[in-house]
Amino acid sequence: MFETIWLLVVEQGWGLALLRGAFVTICIGLVGMMIGLIAAVPFAIARWQRVPVLSQMIDVYSIVVRGVPGLLVIYLLFFGSVDWVQKIAVAFGYRDTAESAYPSIIGILAIATISCAYSIEVMRGALEAVPNGLLEAAKSLALPRSVAFFRITLPLALRLALGGINNVWQMTIKDTSLVSIVGMQELMRMAAIAAGITRSPLLFYCIAASLFFAMTAVSQTLFGLAERHINRGFSGG
Amino acid sequence: MDFTIIAYAIPFLLTGAKTTLLISVFGVGLGLPFGILVALARTSRNRLVCTAADAYCAVFRGTPMLVQIFVIYYGLGQVGFFRSNPVIWWLIGDGLHAAILAVLLNTGAYTAEIFRTAFLSLPRGLIEAAEACGMSPWIILRRIKFPLALRQALPSYSSEVAIIVKESSLASTIAVLEITGWAKRLMSETFAIMDIFIITSVFYLTLNVVGLTALKLLERQLWFERRSTRRKATSLCPS
């Protein structure tokens, strides 16, 4: 039994292919999460300040994306964009590039769309949890609004948001597996290809599962360290 | 919005909704007691039971649902013993059964986490008082720990129910046509991507709203019960 595993994983090189897939998964997850988080900050501020119209639109976006399965969002972005991406690519003469890079771009966008919706809620909750007294103190010192926001509200909110961001990240890294359904070459897709060619799905899906498990475990530890670092001086509070 | 497409899509999505509902009902109906059992195992004093339950939760919470569903449906069928055992083959051989099993195992791990924190947050004094009254562990669980933990856990559990409804969409990856599976088929059939997406979201949002409202009513029921018993208790002893 161990000989067959050795043969499949090492000698036929599927182990390396899966590791490469895992690397792609981490990249999609990180880039998608970053885009989502960066986009979430202005959206969360708009909701926190209750900007009319804009805040209702953000609300609808966040409720819909958080209420429907990630798979459906991915289908929408993939099928909905095939047409005009092709048109744009042909118009600019990048047809081949577009065809090869297309799944990655849309995959990352889909992951960003989903994680952004959750990040908005996390950031808004954190912004609302910053004690009002601190803002009043800033106002009484006649700090300009931008200084008060960037030096007082945002750092405090980020500290409060870290736990929620950890949850969103855990979810995002698991959501990247869904992108495989539409043909992106990440861990899950690699495992499916390996399982199909070698006819041993149990082995390869279990390897994929343990790689995912390793990713979540490592990032959980890192977030634990970050939380301890960011909470220094706040002990007991 | 094209109304002929919507009229065309709704019957298909309704059949899909039946499957989604079936998976979700099994996920909640069996997943809740299962999760509570695992939570009890995790808080138990038996080292072996506790470690096993912890490991189960870590594995199912640390890996994507898609991997779990593939391991159950494609992976386990490879093992000869599972193929020859009729009960296990009935569970994993059929797409729908495998999807229900995967949702059940997945939600069990998350539910166990919710209830474990609820059990741990119970005030120590209450349980000591019950022990001092000579209640057996089973009676303490049934009459003291469980009712209190349920109230604690219900708000978090309601978001877990919404997650179950969403996770059931992964059944479409093993060829069980539920709402998302039908939506994908309709999208590639009619090319009205946005229209189909909008009606499908309406389906999901309705399911979620119905589920969340039911749980909110239950929550209020439990809360009201607590208040009314307190009122009864105060009316019994005249001030």
Image (cartoon, helix red, strand yellow):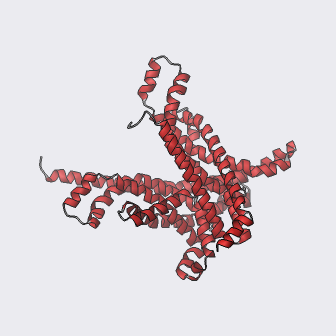
The location of residue A15, given as percent across then percent down, is 69, 61
Farthest residue to the right: give it.
A93
Q: In this view, does A220 lie to the left or right of B11?
A: left
Q: Is residue B226 above or below residue B25?
A: above
Farthest residue to the top: give it.
A142
The location of residue A29, given as percent across then percent down, is 64, 48
Where is residue A59, by image quadrant? top right
Where is residue A57, by image quadrant? top right
Q: In this view, does A158 lie to the left or right of B12?
A: left
Farthest residue to the left: give it.
B238
Residue depicted at 54% across the width and 43% down the height? A165
Residue depicted at 74% across the width and 52% down the height? A103
- Does residue B175 appear in the picture of this structure? no
Residue depicted at 21% across the width and 56% down the height? B129
Q: In this view, does A30 lie above or below B72?
A: above
**Total numbered labels:** 0
The location of residue B2, given as percent across then percent down, is 69, 53
The location of residue B68, given as percent across then percent down, is 58, 64
Foreground residue, B207 or A178? A178
- Does residue A188 appear in the picture of this structure? yes
Residue depicted at 29% across the width and 67% down the height? B138
